[in-house]
């Protein structure tokens, strides 16, 4: 019988020192000893990409895109070799492959390339020789054989795309947190780790500000039905598994997005404002129309760009934050939430709802307190119910 | 008319900082502006190879050879990208290529590979697009596409082999000295730079201890009739040109080789001793037979290896140095030299002569003084005569 294929991805902190690489090796070896075929995707050692970028910027404030990719891709080449050596030293056969050697072919968009195709033959040949295969994340080659890099979050993209191409049984993203939480635990100390979360809910969480996974990574895994697991390099627990289509997860969590701004205009300028955002490549988080004004929510640091070309029509811009409750919503929830927050002296500037999320626009200084109130009122209690129900089902 | 092709090689110190890379770029741009097609071979930034080796040795005292090559080859990838960026910034079209991208195919001997073939198509295509091509030295790929490295002096080998394959008009080795000197100027302050030196003499100089060029580099260039020029990254003079077959250069220089040992045995053990050296891969610099004893001259640090298996037959081993005068030798020179040194209280332990060299074995503490005496007596005076003759010819 064919052994399951597991793709494991380790980020920069995970391979940030030889000591940490030994922890990485333990996870790889466990997967191998459990009877899997293992393909590992690694980032550059933490700090290395910035060191290389620093050298490039000593040469040129805007270095040639092609050569910057050649430069940065050396970072993963170092870490993949060291991880392979570590496994070899521990008695496990392992080989490292650059993006090019792994036949990861991208478009020609240097510094922000998109993977077009992966010919997995080189990898499957090595797997058949019982090798553990270590692949450089974040990089590929274009059709001319020039080295390209994928841009931010690129190693996650490499991992899920490889998992899709290999028809892997699971793609494991190792990070420095041990799973997907109902809310950022630095904000809500009582946030709980979710054992399982469906793709639509995870996509909504990532889209509304949860940082644990990059949105394109979630979307790709969902589209290709690759079960995705988030877990910690520095821990042995099973993390969170993201799979399935249901989109009916009764509870999921709260996503926070800070550093936003509400830019308001007169109603008759709204169309021009949204068009301007699109032209400038500014993501619009929300469009709001009130009786007196209309506006868009955008990243705060995009305001300067917009001001340059549109300032004469802008009535006001103020910093705001978004707090999104993801999961199935009862119809009465919107009023309940606003009342509950009002009782705690927190004003809600705007509410948007979909069948799967309730998005509250708040003043930035209130978002942490609001998150704790809503988590206690809706997530903790539902979690309790959900755990009860699960026990009843499995009993 | 086809433009001349120049291959330029820059070592680790030359690309050791962004500041130095600007000096490198100046030399490249000069060659380009002079109407040449320019191919550049670069080493890793000085210190980088040792940094990477240090990481590998944290993992394993004997790291896997294949993975060590993957690791070390990242060093040249960084410097080649930075040199290409520097040229781009200065307005010159330049592209960098890894050993694999330049189609430098080696045998499978990881860490000490030999170049088997170079398909120059990728390079010539870029040259035809008027690009300056920057190639990673020291590295190639085997027939499976695995990264290999060439061992010490590898970037020089990359450069001359590329020059041979491209039928280049000249291969320029940039170092931190500005040419080939009649003797190491740190030993003989009056040593003179040679403008031209023929291949047989240069080969003899390199073989007998001159460090300016690696012996395999000289031999390859000679065999392929690639004119070789040694010059300094940190200077503008034309360096020394090595070319031609004559082997009749009346004067050339003095080569010094320290750190040797004379290992002596009884006559009837000499054959076994030389056989043992061959078996252990120990290079024999000289075989000496005297009335009382016989012996071999080997590297001092190879003695321990020899002691392990042969110590019971060794009569004595003592540290010695070799001072070799390279160039056409008058028959009476041998006695003259010994008499001259004896008059200065320097004993010569042994003399070997060929038509092109006179090799003196000395006690290590005498070699610097002896070099200065012979340089003054034979090189300075002949240099004067040679310069006179040259002026007479060109006049």
Image (cartoon, coloured by chain):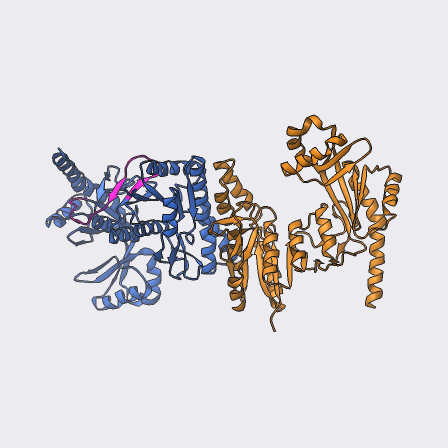
Chain colours: A orange, B blue
Q: Quadrant of residue B263?
A: bottom left
The spot of residue A13 in percent (x, y) is 61, 50
Q: Is residue A376 left or right of residue B252?
A: right
Identify the residue at image location x=84%, y=45%.
Answer: A373
Q: Quadrant of residue B318?
A: bottom left
- Please report the residue visible at 74 percent of the width from the left and 47 percent of the height from the top: A184
Q: Which residues are magenta?
A: B229-251
* Residue B300 or residue B9, whichever sits in front: B9
Q: Is residue A77 visible?
A: yes
Q: Is the C terminus of chain B in the top left, top right, bottom left or bottom right quadrant?
A: top left
Q: Residue furthest top?
A: A312
Viewport quadrant of the N terminus of chain B: top left
Q: Is residue B10 visible?
A: no
User: Is residue B45 or residue A128 the one in the foreground?
Assistant: A128
Residue A111 lies, in percent from the top left, at 54, 45
Answer with left or right where residue A304 lies relative to residue B177.
right
Please say whether residue B333 is one of the residues in the magenta stretch: no
Residue B393 higher or lower than A220, as above or below = above
Total marks in image: 0
Q: Is residue B238 magenta?
A: yes
Main secondary structure type of the part rendered in magenta: loop
Vertically, is A388 above or below B41? below
């Amino acid at each position: 019988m064919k052994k399951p294929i597991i793709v494991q991805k380790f980020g920069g902190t995970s391979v940030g020192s030889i000591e940490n690489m030994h922890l990485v090796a333990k996870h790889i070896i466990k997967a191998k000893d459990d009877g899997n075929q293992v393909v590992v995707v690694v980032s550059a050692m933490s700090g290395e990409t910035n060191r290389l970028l620093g050298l490039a910027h000593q040469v040129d404030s805007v270095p040639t895109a092609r050569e910057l990719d050649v430069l940065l891709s050396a970072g993963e080449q170092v870490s993949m070799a060291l991880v392979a050596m570590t496994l070899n030293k521990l008695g496990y056969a392992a080989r490292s492959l650059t993006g090019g050697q792994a036949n990861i072919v991208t478009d020609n968009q240097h510094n922000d390339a998109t993977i077009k195709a992966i010919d997995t033959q080189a990898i499957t040949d090595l797997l058949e020789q019982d090798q553990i295969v270590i692949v450089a994340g974040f990089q590929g080659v274009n059709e001319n054989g020039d080295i390209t890099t994928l841009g931010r979050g690129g190693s996650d993209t490499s991992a899920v795309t490889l998992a899709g191409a290999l028809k892997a049984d699971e793609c494991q993203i190792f990070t420095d947190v041990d799973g997907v939480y109902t809310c950022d635990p630095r904000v809500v100390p009582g946030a709980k780790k979710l054992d399982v979360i469906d793709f639509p809910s995870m996509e909504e969480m990532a889209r509304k500000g949860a940082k644990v996974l990059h949105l394109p990574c979630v979307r790709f895994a969902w589209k290709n039905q690759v079960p995705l697991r988030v877990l910690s390099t520095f821990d042995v627990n099973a993390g969170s598994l993201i799979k399935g289509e249901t989109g009916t997860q009764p509870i999921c969590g709260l996503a926070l997005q800070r550093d936003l701004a509400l830019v308001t205009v007169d109603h008759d300028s709204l169309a021009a404002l949204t068009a301007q955002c699109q032209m400038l490549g500014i993501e619009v988080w929300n469009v709001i129309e009130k009786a007196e004004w209309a506006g868009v929510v955008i990243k705060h640091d995009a305001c300067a760009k917009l001001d340059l070309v549109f300032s004469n029509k802008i009535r006001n811009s103020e910093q705001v934050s978004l707090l999104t409750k993801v999961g199935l919503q009862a119809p009465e929830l919107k009023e309940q939430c606003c009342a509950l927050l009002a009782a705690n002296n927190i004003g809600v500037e705007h509410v948007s709802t979909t069948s799967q999320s309730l998005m509250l626009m708040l003043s930035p200084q209130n978002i942490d307190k609001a998150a704790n109130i809503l988590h206690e009122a809706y997530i903790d209690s539902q979690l309790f119910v959900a755990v009860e129900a699960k026990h009843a089902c499995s009993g």
